[in-house]
Image: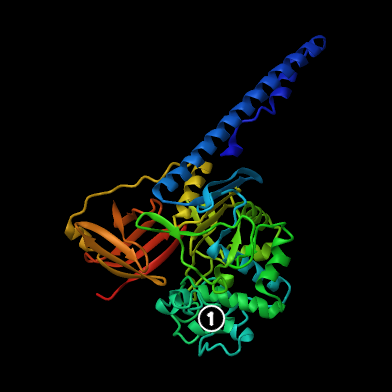
Amino acid sequence: MLRNLAHASGAGESARQVCRDRRSFVAGSALLAAMAGGLLLSNLHAQELSRLELLTQIDAVVAQAMADGPIAGVSIGVRQGGETIVAKGYGFADLENDVKATEHTVYRIGSITKQFTATAVMLLVEDGELSLDDELTTFLPDYPANDNTVTVRHLLNHTSGIKSYTGLGPTWREKMTLALSHEELIALFADEPFDFPPGEQYRYNNSGYYLLGVIIEKVTDQSYAEVLRERVWDPLAMLESHYLYNAPIVKHRAAGYKVEAGALLNDDPLSMLLPFSAGALGSSVHDLLTWLQAFHGGRVVSDDSYRQMTTPGTLNNGEALGYGFGVAVGDVEDHPVISHGGGINGFTTYVSYYPDDDIAIVVLCNTPTNTERIARRIARLMLGMPETAVQDLALDAAAMDVYVGEYQLGPLVLRVYLDDRQLMSQATGQPAVRLRAQGDHVFVPTFDDDVRLIFDVADDRAARVILRQGGGEIQGARIGQ
């Protein structure tokens, strides 16, 4: 959007060509200078007005999200063509001490960690220290893979079939505050049955990325944090990025909050040893803008590694995924986007990069909220795209009953049911939301206007559902009858 502003760079040469009489050249040049100066000032004025309008609109997006909250604090960063459009904070990094959020506030970034882990793996591949087709048991020979062949590639694109430890319910919740060693944490899930044979399905998996961190440490004989500091953060001068252990003093660290009965509370404690290479990093808007520009600008990994990381993976049957290595790959109305979100106790985060438009967006929040939606609304402003129009068509009970049932969506079960003549949905561990009918078996949940649930209906019964979110797609079959 900003790159399309008009410039008056060609006005001088055109005016000079009009001054053919040498005797009037000086006068013509003087006139030209005045015209060019006026055009330039006018153009700069228009550009500043456009920037001010854009910043006002971005402020309004954040203000709406905070009003819908409650939200303690949020920091936003937007960059296009190497130019920072906005980098600022809203609300509070620490409510109890009245500390304002800024672009330098350090947040837990949750699963955005995964693109740093994938980057470290690819740097080791480039060094010849490991291969994407190396088996997990090459590095952990005692891992009980049974008859399953799990490769580094399977771990990177969530197709290993290994049980995710954060999906173990009470077993995981009982251990969340404990300082478990690698061996103790891996023991939580190693003996669990595989969800599927490696490569047969995609299922988002924190265990896979935890194991990648262990592999990185075994190959390098360094800690995971040391590898990132030496290979990524220090070369890029990312001084506000850390393995965010609980104990060390970290300048500008944000406190994390949860919402109960509409009120903000300090969130539950979590041992930061446990998220490890799947989600334990912390960073700021300032650093993550630097990261996105460097990573997508060819300054971190080789062109071949970058291509592999940002190309959707495939299942054994050739079906394409919406995920590469540590990043989701999709589009927003024909604008390709490479992105990832994060959610961890007290924090939700989202980063996205639009390669065709050279737009980077960072949203970091110290309260559970839909940061992806905030980022996408900002992207629409940058791209000059209108907000998605959402209908709410009336359906009778018989029409809605076609969709009622349970569907397996990756690691989650999506329950669709009727409540007081409204069609509702609820995924495992998440609040219930109403579904708004768009026609042709398409529904939009009330929590996000850009999410789509598309049901495959035959003989007046939905057999499966497709979830489209953030440019990616997950298919889920009906469970039972």
Q: Quadrant of the N terminus?
A: top right
Q: Is residue 397 left or right of residue 178?
A: left
Q: Which residue type carries mark 1?
A: Leu
Which quadrant of the structure image shows residue 243? bottom right
312 or 223: which is nearer to us?
A: 223
Q: Which residue is mark 1?
A: 185
Classify mark 1: helix, strand or loop: helix
Is residue 133 at all visible to an observer of this figure? Answer: yes
Where is 282 relative to 392, above or below? below
User: Residue 62, relative to residue 176: is it above or below?
Assistant: above
Q: Position of residue 247 (x, y in %)?
A: 61, 68
Q: Position of residue 359 (x, y in %)?
A: 59, 48
| Residue placed most toward the observer, 281 or 215 | 281
In which quarter of the view is residue 139 placed?
bottom right
Looking at the rendering, in which quadrant would you find the C terminus? bottom left
**Placement of 205 over or under 16, stated as above or below:** below
Q: Residue at x 60, y 83 (%)?
A: 135
In this rendered view, identify the residue nearer to me: 138 or 48.
48
Q: Nearer the viewer, residue 37 or 91?
A: 91
Query: x, y percentage for residue 367?
Result: 47, 56
The structure residue drawn at horizontal position 72% and vertical position 56%, both measured from the top left corner, is: 237
> Is residue 334 visible to us here?
no
**Count of picture labels:** 1
Q: Residue at x 60, y 86 (%)?
A: 137
Residue found at the far right of this picture: 23
**Which of the colour schemes (rainbow, by chain, secondary structure, one colour) is used?**
rainbow
Q: Position of residue 172 (x, y in %)?
A: 45, 77
How many residues crowd around disc 1 within 10 Å: few (fewer than 14), some, or many (20 or more)? Answer: some
